[in-house]
Amino acid sequence: MAAKKKIITLPKVIQIFFYGLALIAVCSLSLLPLVVLFKISIATPEMTMGETLSNFGAFYWDNYRAAWDNSNLGQAVLNSLIITLGALAAVVVASSMAGYAIARYPTWYNRAFYKIILVSMMIPAVLSTVPLYIIMKGINGMNTYWAMILLLAAQTLPFSIFVYTGFIRGVPHEIEEAAIIDGCTPFTAFWHVTFPMLKPVTASIVIIQGVSIWNNYGQAVYFLTKSNMVTIPLSINRFFDKYSANWPQMAAAAIIGILPTIVVFVAFQRYFVKGLTAGAVKG
Amino acid sequence: MTLTKAREKGNWLLNNLHKGMIWPAFLLFLAFVLLPLVFSVGFSFTSWNGLGKADWVGFDNFAVFFQDDRARNAVLNSLLFAGCSVPLLNFLGLGYALLLDKNSTLNKIVKAIVYVPAVISPLIMGYVWLLILKDNYGVLYSLFSLFGNGDAYVNLLGDKNWAMAVIIVVNAFQYVGLTMTIYSAGLQDIPSELYESASVDGANWFQKFTHITIPMLGPSIMINIITNIIGSLAVFDLVVSLTGGGPAYHTETLSLYIYRLAYGGRSGYASAVSVMMFFLIAIPVGISYYIMRKSNLYLNEEK
């Protein structure tokens, strides 16, 4: 018989139709709030919500500048950046080394630490609020970058160690041994040989934990109380309390606040998925 | 072993530096995670108010806890939220994963879109929904007005029965991407031979689903349920921005109550409530872990 012609039958068409419909429904459910937020953010302050929704010609970008000026968002972006980058550097250094120690030198105390870390992933940070407050006061860490950096690094530590340990166990140790024969110590062998091989995990950790540190509100609200120390979520929180009548500006402020995480997600999407599933599969 | 031989040559300190590689992580963890948790238990036996000195009151705080209507209300709200969120997130996540299982570019894009809300601060997400749901000004109200009748709009966030439902649904659509991603990865790992041989044996899709898909997804189900239980029992940001615990105390969860106690100067009691919250999380997590062990849906954790 000659080459079979691809026949699209009626049931097939219906199937494709409903599949497409389902995909559109799924996407709208996730994106609709953001589209609405954007629509509000470009409305003029005088417009009622009804006009905002029915008028598709208005593009009033001034809300963004006004929100930026009125809310100290610039300072908040800077604070969030310093804290996020600082905490990421600390957590990557500490957790990759710890993962290496646990995977390569499973002494009783390294194994015990790993077990405690696993259990601690079950405990939400809110439970230690009161003592943390005392510790932060005691080390003069209230309203400082360094204390917030260490605190958030510590909180993202367990998951990071967990992912690093699982990955390092899968890296053949012969490579480090070869480096040691060539004159490295076990410590330098880690930094020169193993750590560069961990790039994909490091990328995942940086992306996943970076977003969670950037979005942190539950700790920041206790320990960053001065207005020049606020991070993005705190600043939006204050802005919404203060300007609760000016909706377009509130929406613009919210968009400025969430844009960085969305951009990072779109750019490094595959590392999100990898990091999440590495945690799940190795778990 | 070559490692031990290598250690014999050269400087002792440099050669032993690797033994200290656990220390930075250990100290961070000790100072900001472990010690605070231990102290939390200690404070729970005091009447400390956050400023003066702490008096030992034994189990008084716990006795108060069991008489405290607001605490009971917060526990019930947290349980209600978790009890609805965990199944909703998992059914939705699994449904999405099954729908988008075929490995096409279109599906990958849709998966990415579904994940987007999960990278947005839950606090800000709450405010977004506030703009949508707010009475008299909000988007939904205006839509009701545009198409006839604004009075027909029920102020969902101001209604004691609806407010919690709104938080549950908003939370589900924010985090369904996480659950979906774990299920998707689990589905990809199921060997297609299993389905092929089941087809040869005449199994229909439902039999394949219950006898192959679900059992093979065991570890994914376990990861999702446990992380969802922990996450939803600790829900905080979303409640702060959506309802602030209101109307009255109808959506005040345990995290929010602890926050208010700590700010209200009742540090000792806040610690006691935290300890109770630990058990509230540990018990369902422990039970689901045990059930899944029993039903052979285990994980290989120590390799």
Image (cartoon, rainbow, N blue to C red):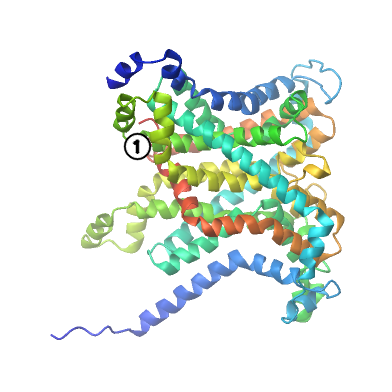
Q: Determine which residue is flagged by label 1.
A: A170
Residue A179 place in picture, x, y as percent: 33, 29
Residue B151 place in picture, x, y as percent: 82, 73
Neighbourhood count class around disc 1 (C-alpha, 10 Å): few under 14, some 14–19, many 20 upward: few
Screen quadrant of the N terminus of chain B: top left
Label 1 marks a residue whose chain is A
Residue at the image position 41 percent from the left and 77 percent from the top = A16
**In this picture, is A196 found above or below B210?**
above
Label 1 amino acid? Gly
Quadrant in the rendering for residue B106 = bottom left
Local secondary structure at mark 1: loop
Q: Is residue B243 rendered to the left or right of residue A25?
A: right
Quadrant in the rendering for residue A157 = top right
**In this picture, is B222 found above or below A192?**
below
Residue at the image position 44 percent from the left and 32 percent from the top = A191
Q: Is residue A196 rendered to the left or right of residue A235?
A: left
Residue situated in front as seen by the camera: B48 or B32: B32
Residue A123 place in picture, x, y as percent: 60, 33
